[in-house]
Amino acid sequence: RVFLRAVNQFSSVLNRFFLDQANFELQLWNNYFHLAVAFLTHESLQLETFSQAKRNKIIKKYGDMRKEIGFKIRDMWYNLGPHKIKFIPAMVGPILEVTLVPEPELRKATIPIFFDMMQCEFNFSGNRNFHMFENELITKLDQEVEGGRGDEQYKILLEKLLLEHCRKHKYLSTSGEVFALLVSSLLENLLDYRTIMHDESKENRMSCTVNVL
């Protein structure tokens, strides 16, 4: 709780003194995001790993601090405005870590950041595409799922939210939809592959490997 208060203090100072064009400090903002993500993903805050009694006790006394810091990360991202392009693709991995935390409200609040990144790269890169974001997300997703994170609910929500946002966008509706479906099918194959790795059947393992490739 003390750490959370300190991190929130840092965020208000960043917004007040280091956000406008003249005083923007890339390294400070970078440090803030990495610190906030490290806090959110810290093992002592992963409530689903505790017994029901311990979880209830913590929530009653402190609430789910992951949600509080997660919503703050989201707000800080949107505050960046035109500076956002400086954080793509470097921030894709940390934001992915946040969205993979199995807390439904946190996921719903932070997954739309991915669409914002796509839109940002499309508008500011000069190439009218979001290849940097796309490549980074696919690479990091592979690593995270292999590391044990991600689940079927995440796959469904990621596809749903990306499709909803892309379909409303004048220029990203087609390429965005293709990307959302690609990521969803990749995630499905990665989850299958992870599940089957302990299967006795070589054929099943090989089939899953082929699907991922």
Image: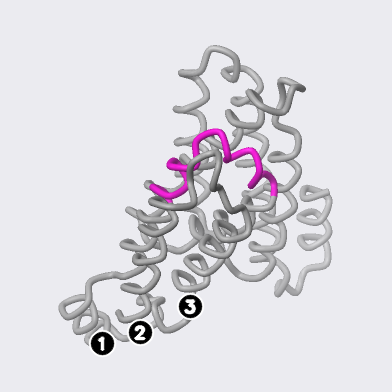
Left-right relation of 132 to 168: right
Q: Nearer the viewer, residue 80 or 207?
A: 80
Q: Which mark is residue 42?
A: 3
At label 3, the amino acid type is: His
- Indicate the secondary structure of the residue bearing disc 1: helix
State how far apart marks 3 and 1 are (Cα). 17 Å
Left-right relation of 29 to 105: right
Q: Position of residue 109 (x, y in %)?
A: 37, 47
At label 2, the amino acid type is: Phe
Look at mark 2 in the image and give the residue it sits on. Answer: 50
Look at mark 1 in the image and give the residue it sits on. Answer: 54
Q: Give the residues in magenta.
A: 74-89
Q: Residue at x 49, y 51 (%)?
A: 18
Q: Quadrant of the N terminus?
A: bottom left
- Indicate the secondary structure of the residue bearing disc 2: loop
Q: Which mark is residue 32?
A: none
At label 1, the amino acid type is: Lys
Q: Nearer the viewer, residue 186 or 46?
A: 46
State how far apart marks 1 and 2 are (Cα). 6 Å
Q: Which residue is farthest top?
A: 170
Residue 205, above or below 2: above
Mark 2 or mark 3: which is in front?
3
Left-right relation of 175 to 208: left
- Indicate the secondary structure of the residue bearing disc 3: loop
Q: Nearer the viewer, residue 174 or 51?
A: 174
Q: Position of residue 76 (x, y in %)?
A: 43, 50
Q: Nearer the viewer, residue 7 or 95?
A: 7
User: Which of the two labelled residues, at mark 2 and mark 3, occupies the earlier sequence position?
Assistant: 3
Q: Residue at x 78, y 63 (%)?
A: 205
Evaluate if marks 1 and 2 touch, with contact meaning CB atoms under 8 Å apart.
yes
